[in-house]
Every structure is written in C-alpha cells, then in structure tokens.
Amino acid sequence: MKKKVPVWALIVTAALSIIMTLTAVSWVLQKETGDFPGFVRFFYTMKLIRQQYVGEYEDKKLFQGAMGGMVKSLDDPYSAYLDEKAYKSMTEVTDGTFGGIGVVLGQKDGEFPVVAPMDGSPGAAAGIKSGDIILKVDDKDVRGRTLEDVVSTIRGPKGSQVKILLKHKDGGEYTADITRDDIKIQSVASKMLDDTKIGYIRISVFNESTGADFAKAYAELEQQGMQATLLDLRQNPGGLLTECLKVANYIVPKGTIVSTTDKNGRTTVARSKLEKIKYPLAVLVDHGSASASEIVSGAGQDTKAGRLFGMTTYGKGCVQTVYHLSSDTGLKLTTAMYYTPSGRSIHKTGITPDVEIDLPKDAKEDVQLKAAEDYLKEEIAKGIAQN
C-alpha cells in the first residue's frame, strides 16, 4: 500500500521545482544575452501593458513591434523583420510580379534614395530619377521608418493612387501623383545593335528567371552572328545572387567571380567554369547599379574580361540571408560581406568604371552606350585583322 504524501510536501516540491527552473533559465539567459535584468524588464513591460494600459492592443502587434525594434537597433538598412505584408512584398519582387509604381529604393543615413526606376514603370513615367530622395508618401513623413515599411506603403493594387514628395539631387522638391499598376518585371531584353555584330543585352533586375532568360538571349544573339557583347546593367538594383552567378558564367573566365566572408571569418568562393572568353565585352553601369550588378561588373573588371563604361556604382557590398520565422514572416539579416576577385570590398564606395562618362539629363544621344559600342567595334576590327 502506497504511503500518502502530505499536501505541504507537494507544495514545497513544486516550489523547489519552479525555483530550480527559474534559476536554470536565468543562467541560460544571462549567458546568452548578458542582460538578464533586461530580459525581465521586457516581460514586465508586457505585463504592465496587459494589466494597466487603458487602450486596445493585440499581443501579436506587441511581439511584432518588439522584433522589428530589435532588428532596427542594428542600424543596418539592409536588415529587417518581415511581417506578413513585408514578407509578401519581398516574395513578389523575386517572383517577378507585383502592384506598385516600379521604383527600387535604398536607405542611406536615414534617407530613402531611389536606386533605380524600372523601365516603362509608372514611377519612371512620372519623372522619378535615380538619386531622388523620397520625403513623404501620401503626406506622411518617412523619417524614422524602415525600408520595408516605406516600400509596402508605396505599393498597392493596380489603379489606386499614391502621392509622393521627393527631392532631386540638386535639392529641389517635387510631388509625383502616380497611378499604381501591375509591375511585371522582364529582367532580360536583347537585340543586335544596328549595322554591327554587337549583341546588346539589358538586365533590369536579377530575379528568379534571369539566368535562364539570359542564356536564351545569349544563344539567340550567337545564332545571329554576335562577335561582341554589350551588357547594360544601368539602373539595375541587384537581386538574387544565384542568378547573377549564372550570368557571370557566360562572361567571366574560369576562376573566382565573388567571395563572401561571414561573421566567423568563413569565406565562400563562387567560381566561373568558363574555359575561355568568347567575345569582347563592354559593361554599362551607373549610380543605380547595385549589389548583384556590382558583383558581375566587378568580376568583369578585375579579371579583365571586359571594360566598364558609365558612372560609379551604388556601393552595396553586403549579403543578406532571409530566415523563415513562420509561413508568412521572416528575418532579413546581413550575414556576410562580398569581395571582388581581386579582394576589393566595394561597400559604400562602389565601382569606378574604366571609362567614366556621364549621361546628361538633356542628352539627345546615349553617349555611354555610344562609347561602349565604339570600343567594341574597335575590338572586333582588331580580331578580324589578327585573323
């Protein structure tokens, strides 16, 4: 027959168990965070809100606000907590279709400069230029907000209106009243330049279809007799690393394309398998060329695979990883820095072209394209002469 345990003994045992658990949790949190009192303050704050706050609130919004604030405290414009709306917005861009005005934004020193307006987009039609800074969206100041928040505010269904106050690089302000549209990103466009054997390939962004689309365009130009390649990466804000590496494998010789180094000093090298460069190459870049665009152009410049024409690039030399926190939320976190084949970090400095040439606003001719075309014509002539 089992002996009956007194109630007081059960209470003491339970209390000791709770104390031991709290002690263990305290030790773990102290070790992991270095600030157990801060951890306690966090939950005490939540407790006070629940018990004393006179207004309405949702636990979900409290947690999302806390997570967003935690990531924001990193002071990294490329890291962000992605709530349902921001996560959906990010996946729409990589998939290639979304509703909005077709303008890619960056974040520098608390401001939101336009990295690049997309070809044929409502934003481009409204006169928005690379380098313009967004000040207000629908009369609401954007200062102090996250990049993802500003982007999600600008986006919206086709046919809806958005009012944006911007500042030009020269300091003048202007308002753009824009009707949103379905933005369908055609990442690759190509043609043979008139009266030449120069294959022109324009990449507007590196999304999930870019590698395959580039391969198709490249093959078609070869069938048309391409003898030189002109790659236009102007106003290309970047995109998926995997896709820019696929493109680089067509124009960068065998060896390093880019290397990335993480927090622990681990370096990963992405390499080209191209045995031999097939054609002379010219690459067009400008202030709107960023991230993946800089990886491709930097590799081409360092390996002498091609010559760069245009203006200094944007200067985004860090890599982000997206971690899925749930089916519809995530964390975008800067996890590595990347380096060109020669070991250059271009973060916040950009890449200076081999031939610097500006494209004036009132230019009647694309002088950057013309300079690159003239160079390639000379290279083709040299090849013919050598043969």
Image (tube, grey):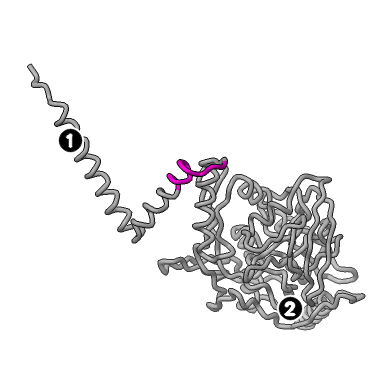
| Magenta span main SS | helix
Q: Residue furthest right?
A: 364
Say whether residue 47 is magenta: yes
Give residue 35's quadrant in the image: bottom left
| Residue 321 % position (x, y) | 53, 57
Residue 116 vs residue 177: left or right?
left
Say whether residue 247 is magenta: no
Residue that appears at 56% across and 57% down? 80
Disc 2 crowd rating (10 Å Cα; few below 14, some 14-19, many 20+) is many
Q: Nearer the viewer, residue 29 or 283?
A: 29
Mark 1 vs mark 2, CA separation in Å: 73 Å
- Give, as a three-letter code, the residue at label 1: Thr
Q: Quadrant of the C terminus?
A: bottom right
Residue that appears at 45% across and 41% down? 51
Instruction: Name the secondary structure under disc 1.
Output: helix
Give the residue at mark 1.
13
Q: Nearer the viewer, residue 162 or 238?
A: 162
Q: Is residue 223 visible?
A: no
| Residue 374 % position (x, y) | 83, 80
Per the rendering, the mark at residue 137 is none
Range drawn in magenta? 46-55
Give the residue at mark 2.
311
Give residue 137's quadrant in the image: bottom right
Looking at the rendered structure, the number of numbered marks drawn on it comes to 2
- Give, as a three-letter code, the residue at label 2: Met
Mark positioned earlier in the residue sequence (1 or 2):
1
Location of residue 242 with respect to 343 vertically, above or below: above
Disc 1 crowd rating (10 Å Cα; few below 14, some 14-19, many 20+) is few
